[in-house]
Image (spheres, rainbow, N blue to C red):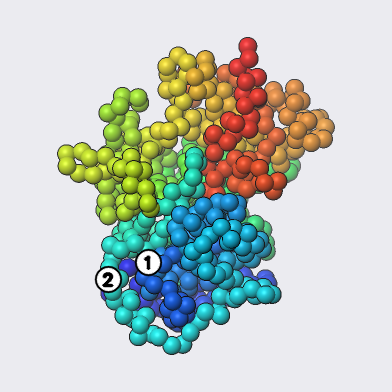
Amino acid sequence: MEVTRLFEFIQYQKQNHPLERAFGHRINGEWKYYSTDEIIDLANKVSRGLLKLGVEKGDRIALIVYENRPEWIIMDIGIQQIGAINVPVYPTISPGEYEYIFNDASVNYCFVGIDDLYDKVDTARPNIPTLKDIYTFDHQEGRKYWEDIFSDEGQAEVESRMADIKPNELATLIYTSGTTGQPKGVMLSHNNIVSNVRDVGEIFPISAGDRALSFLPICHIFERAASYAYTSHSIEVSFAGTSNLGGDDGDLKATQPHFFTTVPRLLEKVYEKIYNKGLTLSGLKRKLFFWALDLTKDYEIDQSKGLQMRIADALIFSKWREALGGNVKGIVSGAAACPTKIKQVFSAAGIPIREGYGLTETSPGLAIGRFSKGGAVMNAIGPSLKSVELMIDASDGNYRPGEGEILAKGPNIMMGYFNKPEATAAVTKEIDGEKWFCTGDVGTLVKGPTGEDFLKITDRKKELLKTSGGKYVAPAPIENKLKEDFLIEQVMVVGEKKKFVSALIVPAEEALQDWCRNNDVEWTSMVEVVQNPKVVAAFQKAVDEANPHFSKTEKIKKFTLVPGPWEPVKADGSKAELTPTLKLKRRVIIEKYDSMIDDIYDV
């Protein structure tokens, strides 16, 4: 069976390697799993129920959950089978943003998870004329339950609808998280995503019967494409949230996964916990810990392990692997650049980290580091996916030699932005009669160990700073280097039209508290302690250690400490500093800290 449409992945699993535990999650502390047959049966009940509600081909149905769950997968399949369009939405956005997206997409029905999701959508409902009803995935008094739509009649019509769906037809409408302006609806066809899933499936170091843990938001195309890949390879998927991953009672220990995808920030938090735990040790244990950690500094992928590394592995690194469940064969990090130090530490510890690069508009993958020998290096992403072509366009002359905007071509490139032909045209470039997608990212191609072209990202085109001296500066590499220091949790480089480059730094609170205890600095509050001269001096040391890695123009001349933290959602309703995928909202941060930035340059 050749899969050409997304809802066929589960049928492919049934035909080749059906599972008793295909998808599962915790309910009241206990794990509940659905088999391949149960997923198919429930998806058909959803399809029949939607037909009974009068859902037509092309109608939009929104799904919103805080934590990934099997019901999302079931609804996704059920929606697709009748030609309706899945509109996945981030749970952390405001009622006003729900109103914008639902009206832009003309959403007809919405299915939500627990907590305040129903209320947020319901608040916006009076201003969304197309929204007919809201259903919940959990029993809530006075509210319609998702199983209320289930029907046992109409399977012949479902089969007819399925047969009529073409691979190049719209399958989903995904709204970008939007670092600037209103989100745009990215139109992805079945073929867009299927082609990408087929490519990445050949790269994952897992096989039928292995286990995956899924905790990144499934509304994002990165985790969603991974879930399709898991399905096609008959991988048992356990859904979890990010709040209970570690520890003896955490989901990593409980599920013992062979593979998962993540974002760099979560890996950084794991590293911070490991480092902070090392700081609590004493005597020989402390010496051994930091001796082992020091061995990872110059580690390269595929490096053979000498005697010292084997000793460190037995005494220290094996415990790290055990904390991740003991079976991890590999991890793919995406959505943002992964600091080299993080890749080195984990990979040296026998937990291979590979980076993937792509966008929602590219379904999402463009390039990814391989787990095979010679397929990855520390300072680059990796080769392009099999069906993807990449080009570096330096025609505007704004970048260093060999660098330019990354252009892409392939079957995974989006159909376009919904109802925004001008925006679609703005990211499309014709070269020698062929259309290329403009990623907005700056990069270069370098030779990998086997002679293949490896993609190396240098920055976002729109995020390049231009100093008052006319020099271009890419902030991301500087920020990633600074974040390698355990005291620094978040950082944003500033300097647009300024004489020099500076930085806003958010301290890592737990690490800073420990530092204060060891350096006779009284901890009162983050707001007060960041003004302590000894604390400022510690961060100055971190900046001084990073600066030699930068050019003269890129060196951080000044910085200021920000109490933080920067978050993707603010409890007080103020503007969030991060997107739902934890990228910096640079304009929001600049606006929020404009007076601090002015003080930096007030000489």
Q: Residue at x 46, y 32 (%)?
A: 463
Q: The disc labelled 2 sits on which kind of residue?
A: Glu
| Element type where label 1 sits in the image | loop
Q: Give the foreground label among 2 and 1.
A: 1
The percent coordinates of residue 494 (x first, y second) are: 54, 26
| Element type where label 2 sits in the image | loop
Please say whether residue 434 is visible from this viewpoint.
yes
Can you identify the residue that label 1 sits on? 58
Give me the disc on residue 2: 2
Give me the disc on residue 465: none
Say above or below: 33 vs 228: below
Please say whether residue 238 is visible from this viewpoint.
no
Q: Point out the tag, 2 or 1, that comes first from the N-terminus.
A: 2
Give the position of the N terminus as an image quadrant: bottom left
Q: Residue at x 43, y 73 (%)?
A: 55
Q: Residue at x 63, y 15 (%)?
A: 602
Q: Residues within 10 Å of mark 1 (few under 14, many from 20)?
A: some
Q: Quadrant of residue 576?
A: top right
Q: Going by the image, does 472 lie left or right of 170?
A: right
Give the position of the C terminus as an image quadrant: top right
